[in-house]
């Protein structure tokens, strides 16, 4: 079993920055990719960013040039650096891990962008 624990969410003013962290633990044999999704009230969960085992990354168009995903393989931790935050970035952010057998999800961390 794999556990994902997120941290780093909170309240920030528009234009501010936050860094989310997600630490993976447990029976981790092969990780194909890790990433972040977000879900705003009344909306579907959507992919924000993903980093593959190869190092390649993908981003949602709405966060390109503002968010950066990175990974520390030694610590099995993935990060999401969020800059120039906007009110529309407000959501619960979920860590996501893709393995050959199944996907895993974190419990979510709230990010609120408001003045």
Image (cartoon, helix red, strand yellow):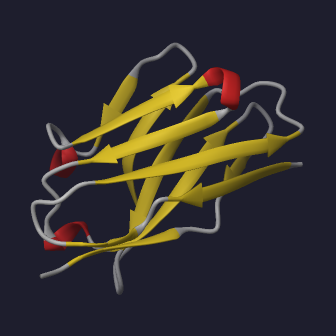
Q: Is residue 11 above or below residue 9?
A: below
Q: Is residue 26 visible?
A: yes
Image position of 28 (left or right of 5): right
Camera-side residue: 88 or 77?
77
| Quarter of the picture holding the C terminus | bottom left
Could you tell me which residue is drawn at 18 percent across and 45 percent down?
Answer: 61
Camera-side residue: 114 or 96?
114
Q: Is residue 45 visible?
A: no
Give the quadrant of residue 44.
bottom left
Give the quadrant of residue 98.
top right
Could you tell me which residue is drawn at 89 percent across and 48 percent down?
Answer: 1
Question: Residue 3's spot in the image, x, y percent?
Answer: 78, 53
Question: Residue 5's spot in the image, x, y percent?
Answer: 67, 56
Question: Residue 52's spot in the image, x, y percent?
Answer: 51, 24
Q: Is residue 66 above or below residue 43?
A: above
Could you tell me which residue is drawn at 80 percent across and 37 percent down?
Answer: 101
Question: Residue 81's spot in the image, x, y percent?
Answer: 33, 44
Image position of 73 (left or right of 47): right
Camera-side residue: 34 or 86?
86
């Amino acid at each position: 079993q794999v556990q994902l624990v997120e941290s780093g969410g909170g309240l920030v003013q528009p234009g501010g920055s936050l860094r989310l962290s997600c630490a993976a633990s447990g029976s981790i044999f092969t990780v194909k990719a890790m990433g972040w999704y977000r879900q705003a009230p009344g909306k579907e969960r959507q992919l924000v960013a993903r980093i593959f085992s190869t190092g390649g990354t993908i981003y949602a168009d709405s966060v390109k040039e503002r968010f950066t995903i990175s990974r520390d393989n030694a610590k099995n931790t993935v990060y999401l650096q969020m800059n120039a935050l906007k009110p529309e970035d407000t959501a619960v952010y979920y860590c996501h891990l893709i393995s050959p057998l199944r996907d895993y999800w974190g419990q979510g961390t709230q990010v609120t962008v408001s003045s």
